[in-house]
Amino acid sequence: MKQSLKKRLRKKGLNKAKLKKSILRKTKYKMKNKKTKNRSKTKNLVTKKMSFSELIEKYPESTEVLMNSGMHCIGCAASAFETVEQGAIMHGLNPDELVKKINKKLSKDKKRK
């Protein structure tokens, strides 16, 4: 196994030091990307996989966006188990756009407080 690795390194013109540097660069790049990905996840408060009951319970101010979008079924029995994505599709809305609007509204409200 060691010989085959050495042969592959010679063919590519790499030695152990160059290989270690390239591995370190790749791992640093991966770690950097993981950090930025986690930041973007915490920024979005609402996801399209949340149920309406969970959304309204956690963020009651989101009802304003839902009502303005034409989703007047907040008190509906189906809203207890239906996700934001399912409700948006049933009403002919783009779920991603709806979630963006809700998150924008919530972030504005947080800045005001």
Image (tube, rainbow, N blue to C red):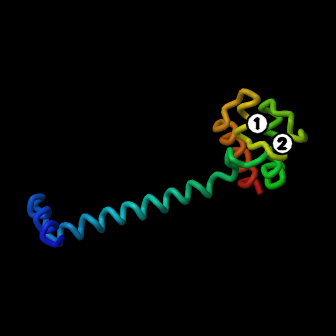
Q: Is residue 11 left or right of residue 95?
A: left
- Residue at 25% over, 64% down: 22
Q: Amino acid at mark 2?
A: Ser
Q: Which residue is mark 2?
A: 79
Crowding near the residue tagged with mark 2, few <14, some 14–19, many ≥20 C-alpha atoms within 10 Å: some
Q: Which mark is residue 87?
A: 1
As drawn, 9 above or below 64: below
Q: Is residue 38 left or right of residue 79?
A: left
Question: Answer yes or no: do the residues labelled 2 and 1 have beta carbons within 8 Å?
Answer: yes
Q: Nearer the viewer, residue 48 or 109?
A: 48
Q: Position of residue 108 (x, y in %)?
A: 71, 48
- Residue at 18% over, 70% down: 1
Q: Amino acid at mark 1?
A: Gly
Classify residue 91 by image quadrant.
Answer: top right
Q: Is residue 22 left or right of residue 53?
A: left
As drawn, 35 above or below 111: below
As drawn, 99 above or below 20: above
- Residue at 83% over, 49% down: 53
Where does the C terminus fall, quadrant-wise?
bottom right
Q: Position of residue 19 (x, y in %)?
A: 20, 67
Q: Residue furthest front?
A: 1
